[in-house]
Image (cartoon, rainbow, N blue to C red):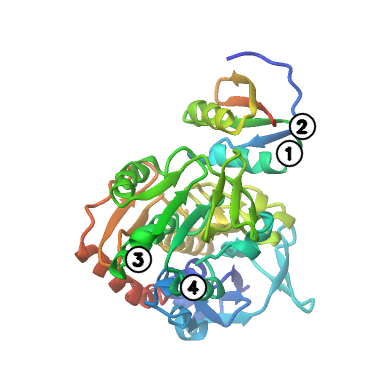
Amino acid sequence: MTERVVIVGGGTGGAVLANDLADRLGSEIDAGEVEVTLVNDDPDHVYKPVWLYVPFGQREPADGRRPLRELVDDRVGLRIDHVTEIDTDRERLRTTGGSTMRYDYLALATGSTLAPGEIPGLEEGGHDYYSETGSEALREALLSFTEGHLVLSVIGTPHMCPAAPLEFVFMADDWLRERGLRDDVDITYTYPIQRVHGNPHIAEWARPLMDERDIGVETFFNAESVDPDAETVTSMEGTELDYDLLVAIPPHRGIDLIEDAGLGDRGWVDVDKHTLEAEAADDVYALGDTADTGVPNAGSVAHYQAGVVGQRIASEIRDRPATATYDGKTLCFIETGMDAASFVEFDYESPPSPAPPSQKLHWSKLAYNESYWLTARGLL
Amino acid sequence: MTETDIQPATTVDARGAACPGPLMDLIGEMRSADSGAIVRLLSDNEQSLTDVPEWTNEAGHDLLATEETDDHYAFYVEKA
């Protein structure tokens, strides 16, 4: 009987996992003993880190899109469809149009979605670079922004790429200096807790850099509402900030399907943080942003988790003990300007120690972004 | 630490979450809570012992009580 593996979501986690399984289980797939199907509602794979560079005119959203069919092994069945229901008791999925898919193993890599509507006024008053359209609109706003108050507000966590808000203000500072505008622009960075980043080691490293660069900081600032007419953003803590350009990291959610299936709250699947197995259902894994492990919602995390899930599913199919576990490994380059970057590497046990910013690390980040397509193909 | 019979309107179970997850979970719940409502946060992260009082003080909410059990803490916060 054919064992069916279904992966939902064609981002980094889903694409890397599909290729990992095609590689591990190639002979079984060729023999018809295993089927691997990747379901995604967009024919393209989207590499989101490109968006950070769009507002500064350095990349285009199209640079982050490639057809999934070009990236995924031919042995993987690619289905462009929208999953509307997960039934973990009957091990079935329902898709748009009412068709059903049976699975023996399910991997959920459905990722993050933006929920700006949770903050009144944010959609009208704020910009973002966490979407293709948002990054393009922010580019237009930045190009005409020559003086005033730029506020970068992190609204809620978890959000994709936890370093990106720091990167944005460092890049904006540098970009405005290069253009001779920095003296006419104040920059303020707001963060929900009492430091500038969720990880205390990264916060401790970043804060002096922000002070040196005259980037203002408001901590314990949880935006509650935005008044687009008055150009103010008000926090739950009672602080009101005037802005001329508001760049926000909107609230994030997973997809409703997860909560509807009883797998976790707000679209994040409750998992064993080492095995990545769902706590509420058998034969279900989650990876990347979707897995509620407490580690950053970052591409490197999804990449490493895909290898773990791939090994575990392959072992189960072959009736071997699944031994691979995820140790929290995370890698992240952090831009500190337009031509310098730092780098961190950490896991569940070892905290990050940011490397001194250098041009070499900046070029390493850009080089990795270019070679990412090899990662998506499962080659790097 | 006190033993309490406070009856919360809602409970946020953030046990197992790494810092700052428990505080962010509490903040998320407080966004939608009514004024006067009591939210209970369960956390097994020691950092919550400083994070939660600092934030409630900053935001003007009342930290009514903190309980310690064998394996976690319970914070009772009343929304201002």
Chain at tag 1: B
Chain at tag 3: A
Is tag 3's residue or tag 4's residue first in the polypeptide sequence?
A: 4
Residue contact at pointers 1 and 2, CB within 8 angstroms:
yes
Chain at tag 4: A
Residue named by callout 4: A15
Q: Which mark is residue B9?
A: 2
Q: CA distance from mark 4 to mark 1?
A: 39 Å
Same chain, labels 3 and 2: no
Residue named by callout 1: B33
Q: CA distance from mark 1 to mark 2?
A: 9 Å
Dot 2 crowding, Cα within 10 Å, few <14, some 14–19, many 20+: few
Please say whether residue A199 is visible from this viewpoint.
yes
Return the residue found at the far right: A98
Please say whether residue A324 is visible from this viewpoint.
no
Quadrant location of the C terminus of chain A in the rendered image: bottom left
Left-right relation of A16 to B22? left
